[in-house]
């Protein structure tokens, strides 16, 4: 293990089959009939390889498939070649030098793909799952919430019925996609369809603070458990006001790109719930720091993903199980994207519960031949 050094880092922008359309307040995440691009990252060292994933969603953040591939190939990979694979702290400091931070952290999605691949590689090298590598796993399963993807009250009622039939008992719905009356009508339809289920809403920065507060007062009458990212990520004043006056707990997602962001919002009393999200936090290394910081400061933890395929899904399951997150988490990739490259062992989901993979590393078997067959050259031909 001590002599295991990074020898090669490869990126594959793969066009995965899309199962259905899904959108957030910023625009489309997946579109039926159009492939969903995911960037898979392979890190190799002394005959062992690990896989990671970066999910380009320009409607959610600034990183695109093109920028992720070029950032890894031209900046991150050269910065870590020859470094010990186990020295994740040194590798993250090398990333900081290669792509400097802006307001928070530079290129977190690209960094996440490499960081997760290194965790997978390390686990495979010594034959243990990621949680064993950390010496931390508080649960063997992770409860999931069903993403309600409809755009109207009638559609969301059908989506809730679909989730219930699949064994899910908690639901999440996106708002901020329409005017306020339509948004609230959608949430009411979900609550009517699932009167006793845990329910939270996510605005993805879609409201101004005064509008968000007005919406929250209505949400409180619908027994909504959390109001996720109601205002823009850097509106610290607005978030502080909301946490002071909002009748629904305010959960932060896009605001927390680095653990230091959580420290700032905690000191300012501008966060009720911290969302753990592997890719937003540049991988598992910094995600663990954020989760521990939240615990140490008495901030509740929830979990979420980026409509990841199975590699990203597995990374999140390992993280959330390590911290025993028992609030149903939003890992919705299986609803919208087909991970056709995962042809062997992968994450098992039964009745809305994900099992922690038992195999070494992430516990996902990646068929590299399928990956190479699906790969597209986004730098020369653009997005399919």
Image (spheres, grey):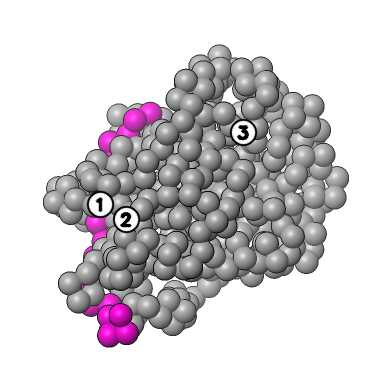
Are the two marked residues, 1 and 3, in contact with CB atoms closer than 8 angstroms? no
Secondary structure category for the residue under label 2: loop
Q: Residues within 10 Å of mark 2 (few under 14, many from 20)?
A: some
Q: Residue at x 65, y 32 (%)?
A: 198
Along the line of sight, the residue nearer the viewer: 119 or 81: 119
Q: Position of residue 370 (x, y in %)?
A: 17, 47
Residue at mark 3: 175
In this orientation, does residue 363 appear? Answer: yes
Q: Which residues are magenta?
A: 1-20
Q: Left or right of 202: which side holds 82?
A: left
Give the spatial CA distance, label 1 vs label 3: 36 Å
Q: Residue furthest right?
A: 245
Q: Is residue 7 magenta?
A: yes
Gap between marks 1 and 2, in whole Å? 9 Å
The structure residue drawn at horizontal position 35% and vertical position 73%, both measured from the top left corner, is 76
Give coordinates of residue 38: x percent, y percent: 33, 49
Residue at the outermost top position: 154
Percent position of residue 26, x then y? 53, 41
Residue at left 51%, top 64%?
Answer: 136
Label 2, on which residue? 359
Q: Which residue is mark 1?
A: 365
Image quadrant holding the C terminus, namely top left
| Residue at image point 75% right, 44% down | 249
Q: Mark 2 and mark 1 in contact (Cβ < 8 Å)?
A: yes
Q: Can you tell which of label 1 and label 2 is closer to the viewer?
A: 2
The image quadrant of residue 328 is top right
List x then y, in percent, for residue 209.
Answer: 76, 45
């Amino acid at each position: 293990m001590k002599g295991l050094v990074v020898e090669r880092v490869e990126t594959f922008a793969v066009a995965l089959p899309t199962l259905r359309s899904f959108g957030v307040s910023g625009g489309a995440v997946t579109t039926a009939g159009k492939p969903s691009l995911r960037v898979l990252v392979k890190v190799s060292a002394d005959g062992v390889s690990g896989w990671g994933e970066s999910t380009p969603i320009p409607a959610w953040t600034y990183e695109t498939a093109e920028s992720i591939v070029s950032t890894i190939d031209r900046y991150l990979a050269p910065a870590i070649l020859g470094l010990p694979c186990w020295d994740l702290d040194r590798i993250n400091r090398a990333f900081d030098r290669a792509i400097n931070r802006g307001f928070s952290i530079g290129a977190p999605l690209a960094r996440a793909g490499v960081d997760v691949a290194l965790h997978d590689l390390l686990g495979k090298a010594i034959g243990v799952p990621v949680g064993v590598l950390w010496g931390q796993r508080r649960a063997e399963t992770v409860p999931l919430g069903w993403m309600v993807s409809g755009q109207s009250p009638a559609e969301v009622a059908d989506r809730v019925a679909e989730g219930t039939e699949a064994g899910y008992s908690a639901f999440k719905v996106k708002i901020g996609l329409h005017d306020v009356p339509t948004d609230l009508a959608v949430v009411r339809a979900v609550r009517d369809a699932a009167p006793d289920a845990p329910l939270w809403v996510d605005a993805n920065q879609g409201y101004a603070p005064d509008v968000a507060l007005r919406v929250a007062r209505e949400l409180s009458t619908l027994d909504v458990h959390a109001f996720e990212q109601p205002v823009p990520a850097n509106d610290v004043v607005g978030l502080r006001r909301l946490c002071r006056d909002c009748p629904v707990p305010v959960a932060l997602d896009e605001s927390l790109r680095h653990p230091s962001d959580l420290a700032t919002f905690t000191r300012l009393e501008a966060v009720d719930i911290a969302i753990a999200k592997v890719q937003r936090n540049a991988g598992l290394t910094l995600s663990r720091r954020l989760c521990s910081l939240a615990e140490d400061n008495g901030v509740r933890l929830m979990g979420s993903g980026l409509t990841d395929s199975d590699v990203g899904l597995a990374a999140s399951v390992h993280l959330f199980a390590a911290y025993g997150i028992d609030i149903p988490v939003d890992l919705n990739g299986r609803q919208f994207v087909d991970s056709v490259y995962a042809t062997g062992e992968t994450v098992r989901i039964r009745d809305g519960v994900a099992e922690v993979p038992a195999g070494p590393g992430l516990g996902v078997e990646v068929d590299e031949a399928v990956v190479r067959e699906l790969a597209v050259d986004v730098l020369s031909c653009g997005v399919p």
